[in-house]
Image (cartoon, rainbow, N blue to C red):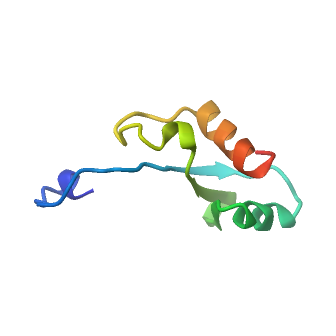
Amino acid sequence: MRTAAGIGFPGTGETLTGMLGDFGVATADPGTLERARARGVLAVGLEDGLTRFVLLSPPRMRVPSSAPVTVEEFRSALRGACGSD
């Protein structure tokens, strides 16, 4: 973020990366987000029916943040953490 804003940072580079995605949630089960949170996934309802998910996926924790995440990678990580997507 600082690099993108042109703000210098004398510290070290990234050492861990996670994933963030905004998705429409198709389920009507109100316990779904609570189950995700109980498994370490940050899940926050946004406007317009979207939900923001933030999670760590061991296979991607050392991938540079500049590498794009595919929808399937995100879904797979969410299924791994929660048992469903």
Q: Quadrant of residue 71?
A: top right
Q: Residue furthest right?
A: 29
Q: Residue at x 89, y 61 (%)?
A: 29
Q: Residue at x 82, y 60 (%)?
A: 32
Q: How many marks?
A: 0
Q: Residue 3: x, y in percent?
A: 19, 52
Q: Residue at x 85, y 53 (%)?
A: 27
Quadrant of the frame with the N terminus: bottom left
Q: Residue 22: x, y in percent?
A: 58, 52
Q: Residue 81: x, y in percent?
A: 71, 50
Task: Tell whether 10 sits left or right of 62.
Answer: left
Quadrant of the frame with the C terminus: top right
Q: Residue at x 70, y 66 (%)?
A: 37
Q: Tell which of 41 and 45 is nearer to you.
A: 41
Q: Quadrant of residue 54?
A: bottom right
Q: Quadrant of residue 65?
A: top left
Q: Residue 45: x, y in percent?
A: 66, 66
Q: Tell which of 48 and 27 is nearer to you.
A: 27
